[in-house]
Image: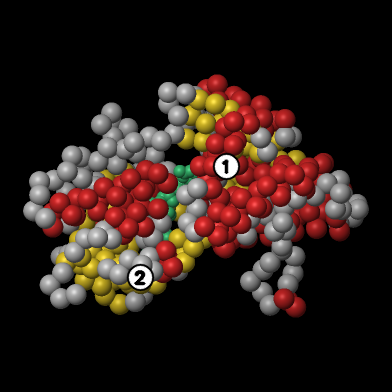
Amino acid sequence: MAGRKRVVIVGAGFAGLAAAKSLRAAPVDVFLIDRRNYHLFQPLLYQVATAALSPAQIAQPIRSILRRQKNCTVILGEVISIDAGARIVKGTRGEVPYDYLIIATGAKHAYFGHEDWRGFAPGLKSIEDATAIRQKILSAFEHAENTQDDAERQAFMNFVVVGGGPTGVEMAGAIAELAKQSLRNDFRKIMPDKTRVILAEAGANILNAFPEKLSARARRDLENLGVEVMTNGAVSDCTADSVVIAGQTIAAKTVIWAAGVKASPAGDWLGAEKDRAGRVLVTADLSLAAHPDIFVIGDTAAIKTADGRFVPGLAPAAQQAGKYAATVILHKLEGKPAPAPFAYKNLGTMATIGRNKAIADFGSFTCSGFIAWLLWGCVHLLPLVGFRNRFVVACDWVWAYFTRERGVRLITTNARSEDTDL
Ligand SMILES: Cc1cc2nc3c(=O)[nH]c(=O)nc-3n(C[C@H](O)[C@H](O)[C@H](O)COP(=O)(O)OP(=O)(O)OC[C@H]3O[C@@H](n4cnc5c(N)ncnc54)[C@H](O)[C@@H]3O)c2cc1C
């Protein structure tokens, strides 16, 4: 509408979507740009990678989410640069002018200077990553079944997950359950319970953001599932056939990278100051010191809390930042004084290890085992976008709980079906 201010939001993840929704009643025109046409619920990606859920169950078209928000226009396109002087966002869909800009482009995995490992050890960040990992895991069992060579068979049945944070722990536990429970009776030559799942963590503990008691409990639970946890296990080399952990070479055809993230290149577009992980350093109101009308939020931003620590890269933190940036813009539009600086509210952290096994830290109280696992289920079900997704995921989980089945054991490739080569 003529004369109305334009708020451009780049990224429809947790942060960008929360910002767009918070501007629903504001007298502004909102333009939400994303290179994907869907919002992705990343916390459940590992379940797609391990054949428990299908991609559509954890993703929702952005246009359908914002269908009723008449002041919001969704643009499918990739942003390539920003001209902060001219207040223009440039991308594959041309130029989009703005009065206020919110950047929420997330993060990607980092290989700490070993980019050559990327091809051998895929990370988990997108639906494409998750289906590629699913294909790799399921194909490994097929190759193991078909080979006559004992050493090669074991290499196909060795799975290494690098990184002992929540994603690594969840992946390792899920692969162990897939191999030792879901696939147990499905092969004739191999014994899936001979599968080795190794979780390599460079530090002294897995899940080191959790209290030591919970981290130790998670380790015990993983070991009970048959996962070998190698702490102080830094990876020094990785090839298509093996990985070197703490100087020990392990033959493994499947290595999964869950060891680190790097922010999106938004800092480079803006020439802004960044931390070591590439996150843009923002002021207390999440804007840039040099450009008070540009906000950087979510995993792309390095946000300091009052106690001097950085806000963690978690979905609730991204949502809180999205809502806050929208509030700052509203205050500016209405000529009100700036709101109090952004304050992150820690809603707790959780990690699941497998069936009936999880840990949860809510600060004032912690829990583990079945109760934590139930809580984890609720906390990951309720924020899924779309009633249909919540319903279908709940049904799949209940079915899987009683049958130990994993319903999405599909080996799919990008090739035409007749060209498919495991
Ligand atoms: C495997 C995995 C498991 C996780 N588990 C949990 C968990 O259990 N609990 C939890 O709280 N957090 C979890 N997280 C972290 C959480 O998902 C992130 O903190 C959160 O997604 C950050 O939100 P965001 O909006 O900053 O970025 P994202 O959600 O990543 O969204 C970024 C958006 O920007 C778009 N984009 C990027 N670049 C461009 C561009 N150039 N042009 C246009 N669009 C662009 C992307 O397509 C994407 O839609 C997990 C993350 C991963 C990867």
Image vertical order of residue 85 relative to residue 234, above or below? below
- The residue shown at (59%, 37%) is 374
Three-letter amino acid code at the position of disc 2: Val
Residue in the foreground of this view, choosing between 301 and 37: 37
Mark 1 or 2: in front is 1
Viewport quadrant of the C terminus: bottom right
Viewport quadrant of the N terminus: bottom left
Three-letter amino acid code at the position of disc 1: Gly
For disc 1, does the CB lie below 8 Å from ligand 1? no
Residue 222 place in picture, x, y as percent: 67, 33
Residue 407 place in picture, x, y as percent: 72, 56
The reply to whether dot 1 and dot 2 touch (C-beta < 8 Å) is no
Give the number of the disc on residue 74: 2
Cα–Cα span, label 1 and label 2: 31 Å
For the question of whether residue 232 can be seen, the reply is no
- The residue shown at (41%, 35%) is 347
Quadrant of res 229:
top right
Give the number of the disc on residue 377: 1
Crowding at dot 1, Cα within 10 Å, few <14 / some 14-19 / many 20+, comes out as some
Image vertical order of residue 39 relative to residue 318, above or below? below
For the question of whether residue 2 can be seen, the reply is yes
Residue in the foreground of this view, choosing between 239 and 80: 80
Image vertical order of residue 259 relative to residue 87, above or below? above
Quadrant of res 3:
bottom left
Residue lying at the far top of the rendered structure? 213
- The residue shown at (43%, 26%) is 363
Residue 72 place in picture, x, y as percent: 30, 68
